[in-house]
Amino acid sequence: MTGVQTCALPILMGIFDIFKSKAKRKEAEKYRIGMEKTRKGVFSRLKKILGSYNEITEELFDELEEVFVMADIGVDTVVEFIDELKNDPRVRGLTSAAELQPIIVDKMFDIYLKGEIVNSNLNFNPNGLSVFLFVGVNGTGKTTTIAKIAHKLKSEGKKVLLAAGDTFRAGAIDQLKIWGERVGCEVVTKPEGSDPSSVIFDAIKKAKADNYDCVLCDTAGRLQTKVNLMNELAKIKRVISREVPDAPHDTLLVIDATTGQNGLSQAKAFIEATDVTGIVLTKLDGTAKGGIVLAIRHIYNIPIKFVGLGEKLTDLEYFDIEKYIYGLFAEMIDDEE
């Protein structure tokens, strides 16, 4: 089974109502556990703030703004969020700050979805081989992410081949080979320093000959000049699309959630250099500032496809906005039951 289709916010049924169901809470358990640092860090202040005001005031909105900026949601995103919160017709009739809770939670949906249907699925080729390209700076967990996605796709019945296209970083090829052995996937390699396009060409050729379903392609994560990066990725994409029309079917940018706003700055170069179709956010369990999901979507208008909620192979999850919001506000939502 592929990723969750994230649909438009159920306006008549807010998140507080959705997670009254024990079955729904059980489905989101990995998010609740994996996002504990964020929830008990910055977001724990939210409940205290709302409980300390008897009425809705400008000072209250100022404090909320500070909390959300500290959560790495991003200044521009937060300013827009607070303005929309102030102008929400539901706020005008409230008599206490605590009543803001469900409205704040619903507004988080609005930030992410922007009134659209957001597809969090991988874009598989319905007519044959699917090719997925992975980009991002070194240290984000890109190679590990490829292995985890390979493991996930294999568990869904797909035949998966890995292409060691990071021929620049010392040890990158060996690292992917080790992961390949661990998850039971063959890895196509060439010596360090080889043209990455030729590695990926060989992988696609093998995948077509041996009836693979998917090829996952690693790439170099060095921070080059934007022109060099753009040229290298453009060449790789030309080779891929020549062999498989309309491929790559997804270009996934891997970002380390623990790097916060620095991660967004690094990501900017890749987003400007190539057509990124989705984000993989690693190490979300390792940060107390998990609001970066909302910042990425707001700034770049690119969907999150996967989030890392732990170190195990099975801890990379398809992104689900409902479960993510529950991960941020679990205790607050559970208290409402």
Image: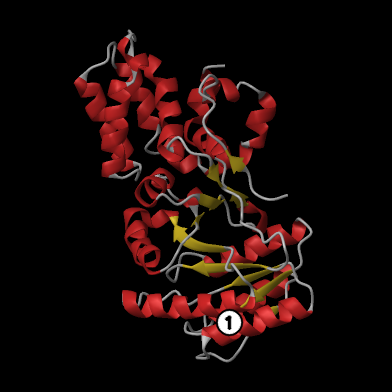
Above/below status of 272 relative to 210: above
Q: Which residue corresponds to the image point at 29% horizontal and 22% vertical from the top-left?
A: 87
Label 1 crowd (10 A; few <14 / some 14-19 / many >=20): many
Decide if residue 308 is on the left or right side of residue 179: left
Question: Is 26 above or below relative to 14?
Answer: below
Provide residue 175's location: percent of width, then percent of height.
59, 77
Q: Relative to 179, is 93 on the left or the right? A: left
Instruction: Please name the colour scheme applied to the rendered image.
Output: secondary structure
Residue 289: % across, % down: 39, 45
Q: What element carries label 1?
A: helix
Which quarter of the figure has residue 320? top right
Of the pair 44 and 266, the residue shown nearer to us: 266
> Residue 293's x, y, as percent?
44, 46
Q: Residue at 39%, 14% (x, y): give it.
A: 99
From the top left corner, tell me how far across and down residue 152 is, in percent.
69, 57
Which residue corresponds to the image point at 27% horizontal and 43% vertical from the top-left?
A: 76
The answer to whether residue 165 shows anywhere in this view is no
Q: Hey, which quadrant is residue 56 in on the image?
A: top left
Q: Name the residue under label 1.
A: 173
Q: What residue type is labelled 1?
A: Ile
